Image (cartoon, rainbow, N blue to C red):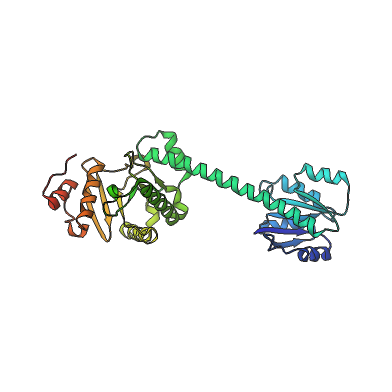
Amino acid sequence: MLRVLLVDDEPFILRGMKELIDWKNEGFEIVGSAADGEEALLFLQNHDADIILADIKMPIMDGLELLRKLRTSEKYRDIYFIILSGYADFQYAQEAIKYACNDYILKPVEKEKLVQALRKVRGLKNIELEKERETKKLENAYLSGKLISVIRGRSDPLTIEYVQQHIRLSEQVRYIEILIDRKNYEDDYEDSVKLANQKQLYSICKDYLQDDSPHCVMDVSMQEKVYDVGFILCRYMYESSDIKEYLGDFIKYLRKILGLPVIMIVGKEEKNLEEIQTLPHVFDLHYEDQVLTVRCTGARHNLIRLLNYLQSQDITFGQVSSELPTLNDVFLEITGKQLRD
């Protein structure tokens, strides 16, 4: 709903305007009224309005002066403005156009003319909102690209500075990678299905992170056909709990909304963004209610092989000793074979 402020020094005009059309049905809500321009400015100090309908002739401050003040104000310059006038004077209309008045309606105001003017404003607002969405989309894509560069270790000081200026960070950060943990997922599912699941997982993660959604990225991995989602975890995100509780709740939420099992690869805590790695040498695997801490021997496919084997044999991390130091040790205990790079 677009918020409307009516400005006229004649009370009966204000009452008539409120009753002239079905404002709600047209997508508008009258949030207030004022007797002159000065009163309107006082109203705006404590209330928001998207559009002002003002009489051109009023005591103290008339409609044109109010329009001039709005257009020269950083805070109010984008408010839509419709002038109501009993004067069919071209000079008034010229002055109104000079200050970007959106419409000029002669009194007595006809219902059809008012509805037409309001619909014009609503159309302009819709175009404005669409432009804002597109701009925001491009900005987010640009930020994601910069953040991915940092995570991959391929950034320069300017890139790091840009990321630091556009997302909230703490002194301690981690990179968290999220993978879908369905049995035989890598081999048995079409790429189109995995891509659709990845996009859905990404969207759910951003919804969960809310104001911290810019921390979330996808396609960080340089591995072909690895449909990953990841995010930068900061200390402030779990101030009221510990990291295991926070990530445990996160996983449960993802599993519930996505309808698929997921696993998190949790990188070690680093002092700053520059030291984050996509697959660090030491990480935790969060699976169901179990956490297995292992040391990576260097290759991502070793991790994928281990996860696939555990899934194919219906083995949970709860059946694996949490003291095993490396992926190779875990694989050796389960299979009796060495895990080779």
Assign the C terminus to one quadrant of the image: top left
Image quadrant holding the N terminus, namely: bottom right
Please name the residue shown 38% across and 60% down the image: 253
Residue 200 placement (x, y as % from top left): 41, 52
Residue 142, given in percent of the width and then of the height, sits at: 47, 40
- 272 vs 78, left or right, is left
Q: Is there any visible trace of residue 231 in the rendered image?
A: no
The picture places residue 239, in percent across and down from the top left corner, at 38, 58
Quadrant assignment, res 149: top left
On screen, residue 166 above or below 122: above
Name the residue rendered at 26%, 48% in the picture.
283
285 to the left or right of 114: left
Q: Position of residue 21 (x, y in %)?
A: 75, 63
Left or right of 142, for residue 77? right
Camera sees residue 302: yes
Give the total of numbered labels: 0
Identify the residue at horizontal 77%, vertical 51% (top origin): 66
**Furthest residue toward left:** 336
Between residue 122 and residue 149, name the one nearer to us. Answer: 122
Report whether 106 appears left or right of 145.
right
